[in-house]
Amino acid sequence: MKQLMAMALTFLRIFSRDRQAIFFSLFFPVIFISVFGLIGSAGEDPIAIGVVDGAATPLSQQFIAALATQPRFALTQGSEDTLRPQVIDGSLALLLVIPDGFDDELAASTLRVIAVTSQVRQLDLVLPVLEQALVDIERQLRDTPPLFTLQLEDVEARPQNYLAFLVPGMLAFVVMQISIAGSGYNIVEYRRKGILKRLFVTPLAPRHFIGALVVARSLLCLLQLSLLLGYAIWILEVPLAGSLILLYFVILLGTATFLSLGFCLGSLAKTQQTIMALGNIVTFPQLLLSGVFYPIDILPGFIQPLARLLPLSFLADTLRSIAVDAATLTTLWPQLLGLTFWCALFLFLATRLFVWKDVAA
């Protein structure tokens, strides 16, 4: 145990002297998630629409005043010749033209809507909102009550936003990155420099070397995840619904899984170029398919079953279930079983593939 802890402290000292590694592994994820925090905290902007009062009657002025009270819209009044170019250049979502003769509350009127029809997605969002606002305004002008109202009963007051979805995925991604980099890349570098070959002839047992590397990387991973999690909870105010202890247990299991994967890659690769290529092949598909930045459900149907079986998918889904849905061990057993399977498989392969003496020519 003394040899193992002494070696682990040595690995930690080596890491503490690498400023670039400290920045990219500890502070870069904080900067990255801060950008998404700023994006997610931005409020929804009102829809910019132009209004042309072609009637100039008390009823049209009352209609425009009622429309201006709608918080969903930002109104700009003017002539059609002035406002039409703003629709074309995108400054206004659409232009609403009140026709001449808009002076009878009981008579139906047709309002012209001028828009760039090629912007189909934008119109699909704006027009339903505008139509609903016109119905509300019509009821106000005619003093007629609505036929029915909706009463919302909130059964779960847990906020759901993109940042709350993103943080658990980022935690899973950071676990994968620091674990693979800390095992596979280091193993290749130590073997290339002959460090493993020299350690092999010392009284240090292989299990002490591997155990020390696992302990050091696990501590670094916990430090980084604690920093990222604390920043998200206390600075960005992302809620944590589940158990913090269970969250760290899953993090440790994920760390063991990807450390074992890193050892496999480090045993297969003989040069830094090879380990970088293998690392990219393993990490980038998982980053895109494992639901880190967006739900797996939006992927094409034929990819979803494969995406759900990836080790990063199990880790991200488990962490998200704990952080967002307050899941417990009794409900997480399928994800934990899948993550444990990958951990056992990678550990078995790592012990079979790991070599001490081979050095690249």
Image (cartoon, rainbow, N blue to C red):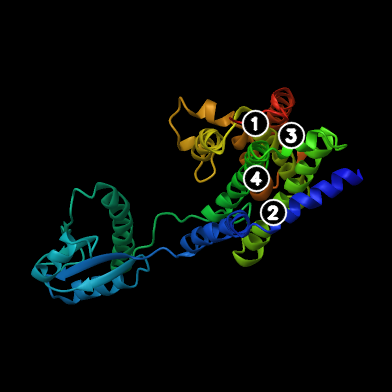
**Where is residue 137 shown, x and y percent of the image?**
31, 65
- At label 1, counting other C-alpha atoms closer than 10 Å, the crowd grade (few under 14, some 14-19, many 20 or more) is some
**Which residue type carries mark 3?**
Lys
> What's the residue at 13%, 75% (across, down)?
56
Mark found first going from the N terminus, 1 or 4: 4
Q: Secondary structure at mark 4?
A: helix
Labelled disc at residue 359? 1
Mark found first going from the N terminus, 1 or 3: 3
Q: Is the residue 241 above or below the residue 236 in the image?
A: above
Labelled disc at residue 15? 2
| Residue 358 falls in image quadrant | top right
- Pointers 1 and 3 in contact (CB under 8 A)? yes
**Where is residue 245 shown, x and y percent of the image?**
79, 49
**Where is residue 254 shown, x and y percent of the image?**
69, 39
**Quadrant holding the N terminus:** top right
**Which residue type carries mark 2?**
Phe
Mark found first going from the N terminus, 3 or 2: 2
